Each structure stands twice: as C-alpha cells, then as structure tokens.
Amino acid sequence: MMKKTGIILSAALAAGLAFSALFVSCGSSSADGVDPAITKGIQQWNKITPEDAVDPWNGISDAAVKAKYLNYVELYKAGHEALESTDSMKASQETKLLNACNTALDKFTAIDDSQLKLPPNDCEKGANLSADRINKLLESNKITAAKTMHQKSVSVYGTNDALTAAGKEIDVVSGIYSKSQALSGEGAKAAAVEGFEAKVAAYDDAIAKYKTAESEVDSLASKSGVAGKSAVSKNINKLKSDRQNLESERASVIREKAYEYKDKIGEEFARELTTGTGKKGAITSYDIRNHYNSIQSNIDKIYGELTAFAAQYPKDVGQDVLSDIDAQRKDLKNKIAQINREIANEEEIKSRGNTVMPLMIGLFNPDPKSTAESKKSRPAKFSSAKQKDTDYWWGMVSIPSGQMNDLVITLKDNRTVHVYNQNTHSGKDIKKKNLQDLVSKANKIGNSWPVMNVGKALNGGSNYYFSIEEGKTNTYAGEVVIYSSFVTRSR
C-alpha cells in the first residue's frame, strides 16, 4: 500500500537508497536480496515520474517480479487516467464521478509496494475528488460507504484540508443520523396513544426530544467547522423536517378534535322535529320556533366549548373552523328570525278578526249587476249567524293615487259600525291607542256607514278594520263597496 510520507520517512528512504547504492556499487547485489534494477526503478518512480521506472524494471532478472513491477506502472496509468477523466465531467454526473473516484482508488491501492509514492498532483486531485464524493454519499445517508472511501483515500493519498473536513463531516452526519434513528419511532408511539389529551402530551414530549437533538447537532456542526457542508445541512434539515412532521401530526389531532365540535353543531343544526303540539301531533309554527330555539341554545353551548378549546390551542384551531361555525350560527339565527316574523304575521292576521270576501276591492272590479252605477265596485260580503258580542272584520282596498274614493259598509239592519285604519286586536287597541273611528256620521245614510276619501283616511295604506256591535238578533249580513263619490251619487 502506498502512503504519503513525512519528512522522517523521506529521510529514512534517502538513507536507505544511499546505503543500497553503496552496497550495490560494491558488487554485492545478492547480499540483501534486492535486485538493483528494482531499487533503480523505485528511485526513478519517486524522483521523476512513475513511467520513468519502466526502463530499470525491464532489467529485473526474475520474470515474475519484473511483471509485477511493470504492472505497477500500468496500474498507476489507469488510476491517473481515471482522475484526469473527471476534468471533462459535469457536477451533475455524479455516477461517473463516483466510478472514476473508485477506479483511481482501486488501481492505486493495488500498487502494494510502500516505497512507491504517488506524485503530489495526483494525491491532491484524488483527495479532493474523494472528499466531494464523500459529501455526496453523506447527502444520501450512505455513511458506511463514505467511511470506507475516507479510510481508503487517506491510505492512498494521505491527508489534505478537503479530506480532513470530510472526516469531520462524516462524524457530524453520523451523529445526526444516530439521533434521527433513535427518534424515528417517537411519532408512531405518540400516534398509538389513546385519548386526546394523552396523545397531545405524547406528541409534545416527542417534539421536545427532537428540539433537544436539533440543538445538540447544531452545536456539533458549528464546532466542527463543517456546518456549511451540504451533507451536514441536509441532514440537519431532515431532522428538523421530521420534527415539523410531528408538529403537523399534532396539529391534525387537535383540528380533528375541533371538527368533532363542528360535527356536533352540524348534527344539532340538522336535528328534525317529528311531532308537535297541534291536533294529532301536528307541528305548529310555535313548535317550529321552539324547536329552532332549542337548537340555537344547544349550538351556543357547543360553540362555547369550542371557543374555550380554541383558546387552549390558538395556533392549531384555525379561524376557518370558527368561521364555518359562525356562518352556521348566523344562518340559524336568520332562520329563527324569519320564523318569528312569520309567526308574528300569523298572529297579527288572526287578531284582525274575520275576513271579508273578496279580500281586496276597488273600482278595478265593478259590480256587473250595477250598470246604472258604473262607478260602484264589486262588493265584499260578510255575515254571521251566531253573534254573541262585538265582531271584528278586516279587508283590503285598492285606491289609485290622487283618487278621492269612498268606502261604504252597508248592513241589512241598524247595527252600529266603526271603521279604523289599523288593527284593533279584537278591540283591545281601540281605547288603549285611542283609535279614531273613520266613519263620517255626517254623511251616513240609513244603514250605510261611509268613510270619505278612504285613501287619505287609511294614511295611504290598503288594510281597513271594522267592528259590528251587537243587535237585536245574533244574525247579520252586509257588504263593503267602493264609490267614486258616495256623496254625489247618494244626494
């Protein structure tokens, strides 16, 4: 094996060669068993070039020894050519560079005479080539192959700055890899833990171990002086990436828990009402409102639990989850508000009393039976066969803007009629709100109760409300008509 010599070995070799030369010059070539041709060839190899050893070695008397030494030259040439071939290779051709590096090492290693030294240029070039390949091997975590190449390269080329750094790089990467392997099962261990809080705690413990390892390898790399080497930074980044993956897994566990709250809210939101308080279990508007109110109450409770959970893990429960649920809650509140409006409308309509038919009248629907009175509308009818108290009715009119049409309620008997421009709630609001009776008693004719200029009297509205007081019987009937001008036509 060839080794790079120091000053002492060089001096020893020089003394040995001088001694050998003196010994040979005395004509005693067999006293030490060394063929002078071998010694001469070694001198030529080391002082000039390996190819210059060919002539002396051609004079070696032993054919087998001669073939061995001449083969050393061929081995050197092959190794040297392998090194030289890398000059035309690109950095991206790593496979070719690695093959050339190994070829050179194999050829030079096969030169098994320790007195034969490689030229300094070959040693420097070979050492640098090996150092670069060691870096690439370490990038791929081929640590054993990197160690083998380093040992072989030092043996063949000796040491230089590049190989020294490569040795430190191997130590650092080996340390990172060992720590990474020791921690590799932490994620699976945490994932296997049952129970949310215990699982999160297991992930926290694993992540803490990774952070400790990262701190240690950062310090090791910094002290070694090879922190900037790509293999070192790549392995450090791999360790950090593994820790970040654990953090992502932990975050997923927390988000899954948050989505459990979201799913509960979704289930509550979709809960159906199957029976109501109406006849035979019919579902009323009030049942629907109470159902949705209970849903909202339950959702608010679950949402409170979720927001408390989100406050405990603010970095992991994203605003997107809360925003989704806020949208659900807002949608539900809008539905409940809509239902309440409909219920309020229903209650308000019920409170108006009975409804005349047709509900809306106006001069757009003239009575075909009243040809002599072409400007009298089709009448709205009303009647009762069981009056026990004051009855309340309502209807709608259509009065064109700017028209001074009159509304007239006519009964078949002399019961008293009152007309109002807003709902009386079965008489409860008449005194409470001091509602004004719109009937123009000055223009009353018989049992006809007129409201003059009804469009203005109703403040531009379309609904009118009227009450009929008790009479001598519990039966009555009547009609509501719109006139173009009741006074003109009646006088």
Image (spheres, rainbow, N blue to C red):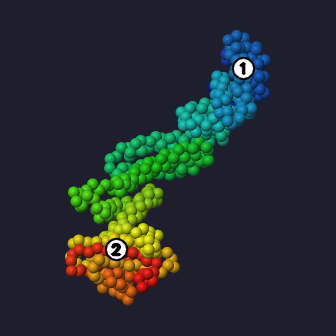
Mark 2 secondary-structure assignment: strand
**At 26% across and 72% down in the image, what residue appears?**
384
Point out which mark residue 184 bears: none
**At 28% across and 62% down in the image, what residue appears?**
284
Viewer-proximal residue among 95 and 173: 95
Q: Position of residue 442 (x, y in %)?
A: 38, 89
Distance in Å between CA atoms under marks 2 and 1: 130 Å
Residue 208 can be seen in this image: no
Taking 410 as reference, is 193 above or below it?
A: above
Tally of numbered discs? 2
| The residue positioned farthest toward the front in the image shown | 372
The amino acid marked with disc number 2 is Glu
Point out which mark residue 74 bears: 1
Q: Quadrant of the N terminus?
A: top right
Mark 1 secondary-structure assignment: helix
Q: Quadrant of the C terminus?
A: bottom left
Taking 122 as reference, is 266 above or below it?
A: below
Say whether residue 36 is left or right of residue 376. right
- Label pair 2/1, CB-CB below 8 angstroms: no
Mark closer to the observer (2, 1) = 2
**At 73% across and 29% down in the image, what residue appears?**
85
Taking 170 as reference, is 387 above or below it?
A: below
Taking 147 as reference, is 333 above or below it?
A: below
The amino acid marked with disc number 1 is Glu
Residue 34 can be seen in this image: yes
Label 2, on which residue? 479
Q: Position of residue 35 (x, y in %)?
A: 71, 16
